[in-house]
Image (cartoon, rainbow, N blue to C red):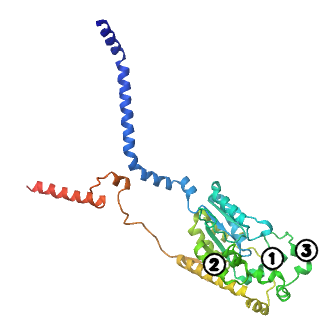
Amino acid sequence: MPSMVRFCSFVWRQRWPVAAVCLICLLLIVTLSRNRLDEQPQSQPHQVVQTFNSPIQQSKSSIPSLIVYNRVPKTGSTSFVNMAYDLCWSNQIHVIHISTSRNQHVLTLANQAALVHNLTGWREMQPMMVHGHVAYLDFGRLGSPLQPLHINIIRDPLERLISYFYFLRFGDDYRPHLVRKRMRNKRTQQMTFDQCVEQGHKDCSEKSLWLQVPFFCGHDAHCWQPGNREALEQAKRNLVDKYFLVGITEELGDFIILLESALPRFFRGLTAAYRSREKSHLRRTSHKVPPSQATIEKLKKTPAWQLEQEFYNFAKRQFHYARNRAFTKHGDGAAADGADLLEWREQRFVYEKVRPKRPFVEQAAAPAAQAGPVNEVVESNSENDDKKQNADQTD
């Protein structure tokens, strides 16, 4: 037995430094773990803010992640889209064209669902702007949780129809060498707009005039019935409720300024691009003959023109309201580069009276018997302590 005691004593003398080091390390690990657990509730709110404000996270999670531009033909959309393509690299966004078979504006029900499903799940391409000559699509109606921002541009309906009529026959300065179907028949190509209306040709019919209302109305059957009052009312509702901003071709420069100021993540530099000489002009039809007054009066009697004009005037009022809330324009809008003097209306918003002052995780740790907000209790206790201390000093 004494020999066993001597042996254990010998081992302890040889091993105790190692045991002491291990014990110290274990105590350090336990202490650090407790500190991290204690600090976690306090640092969590700050971590959320840091994640939101970091450049990488902001570029991926910025709202909106998708802009849909269902562009109406012959409204200046090509010039606008080309400028967006020029800026996609510098703004780090994707711009994607939706092309449909035979330029059809109405999609089948299956293609509506497929398109919305694809755009909703195409997260690696977000933020992105998609554009195409397609009628309005309601993402929520098709089961998507994504709520894109819709934008558009419309034009005086009669001017748009005349421009489209001659565009089919003579092309434009964007692709001057492209030969289109109407150009192959000289008789059809040389037809004037007056002759078209007089002969009842399909290129100037009520169906051809009826386009901007159905583009905003959507894919319902009544939307594409020329002169349908229900379609007009639905188009108005969609413009107000579903569209972020709708501009007009005749004041495209103001639309671009508003869009860049509101959505710089997508359109930073758009105003400068528009004012440059290469991009400041619209896509111009190569040849147009002004219609006679008799032709104009004849078209104005049609239900299609009357409702299209009503919708155009409605959209124009909405656009002017949004523009005038943002800035005052000094000038007649005739500046060559569109650089009329703008006076921005001063407006800002701040967050104040944020309650409770403390994070909720700290309040949860407070005693349940406390009444009222935690910050008020603390302030009240501090005042009582000060009064007690002053009384003690006086005594």
Neighbour tally class for label 3: few under 14, some 14-19, many 20 plus, Cα within 10 Å? few
For the residue marked with disc 2, what is the amino acid? Gln
Q: Secondary structure at mark 3?
A: helix
Residue 230: percent from left, percent from top: 66, 82
Above/below status of 88 relative to 222: above
Could you give the CA–CA distance between mark 2 and mark 3, rounded to whole angstroms? 39 Å
Above/below status of 154 relative to 363: below
Could you give the CA–CA distance between mark 3 and mark 1, rounded to whole angstroms? 14 Å
Instruction: Provide the residue designation for mark 2.
Output: 234
Instruction: Provide the residue designation for mark 1.
Output: 167
Viewer can see residue 236: yes
For the residue marked with disc 1, what is the amino acid? Phe
Which of the 4 quarters of the picture holds residue 264? bottom right
Instruction: Provide the residue designation for mark 3.
Output: 184
Say the numbered circle drawn on residue 190: none
Q: Secondary structure at mark 1?
A: helix
Residue 379: percent from left, percent from top: 26, 59
Residue 218: percent from left, percent from top: 68, 73
Neighbour tally class for label 1: few under 14, some 14-19, many 20 plus, Cα within 10 Å? many
**Residue in view at x 75 percent, y 64 percent:** 99
Foreground label between 2 and 3: 2
Q: Quadrant of the N terminus?
A: top left
